[in-house]
Image (cartoon, rainbow, N blue to C red):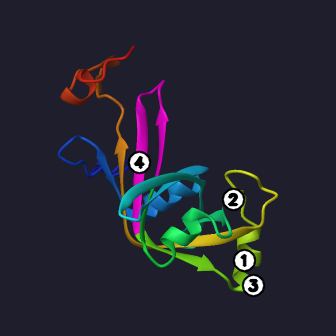
Amino acid sequence: MNEGSEPVPLVDHAGLEVLSPEICLGLVASAVIGRVGFVDSGDPVILPVRIGVWGKHLVFTTARGSKLDAAIMERPVAVEVDDWDAATETGWSVLVKGVAQVVDDGREIDSLDRLSVHAWTRPDIPKAWVRVVPEEITGRRILPPPTLGGTQLSSPHWARHPRQ
């Protein structure tokens, strides 16, 4: 690498930039909405939640006694968070696999209540905080199309998704 040049991103077989867990958590921290996936009575379920990052954990709230609360406590979950910019045709996706836990320590709840993570619906209903303890954090970023002298070059990835 030449001095002053940008590091070359690691790219997967599909041409997507592979993101480190640290970059993934930073991107998730910039997001508001994520999706929590889990298995309930043998069926896959994916629900939207307002998401936050607390240390190295993902956190969200749910109404006490809700289906989500009952279904995922101490069970494996997956959380997906993403962003897409249609103007630049760039975006990212992060997948966090881990275990969901109810936060019941009063000091931890006080700390979480200071985050700007609010209930998905009915903020007036008492809530429970859920933390996802990550076991695996992966992410990909869609890189902008390559250019040469200011002209966008065609590539298999971009050719399959032409601009409208």
Task: Residue type at mark 2: give it.
Answer: Val
Point out the residue furthest to the right here: 124
Query: Of the numbered discs in the image, which one, if any, rests on residue 106?
Result: 3
Q: In this view, does 154 lie to the left or right of 127?
A: left
Determine which residue is flagged by label 1.
109
Q: Is mark 2 on a helix, strand or loop?
A: loop
Determine which residue is flagged by label 4.
93
Q: How far apart are marks 1 and 4 (CA)?
A: 28 Å
Q: Distance between the residues labelled 2 and 1?
A: 12 Å
Q: What stretch is highlighted in magenta?
A: 80-97
Sequence order check: which comes first, mark 3 or mark 4?
4
Residue at position x 45%, y 27% from top? 88
Q: Quadrant of the C terminus?
A: top left
Q: Is mark 4 on a helix, strand or loop?
A: strand
Q: Which quarter of the picture shows residue 78?
A: bottom left
* Whether residue 107 can be seen here: yes
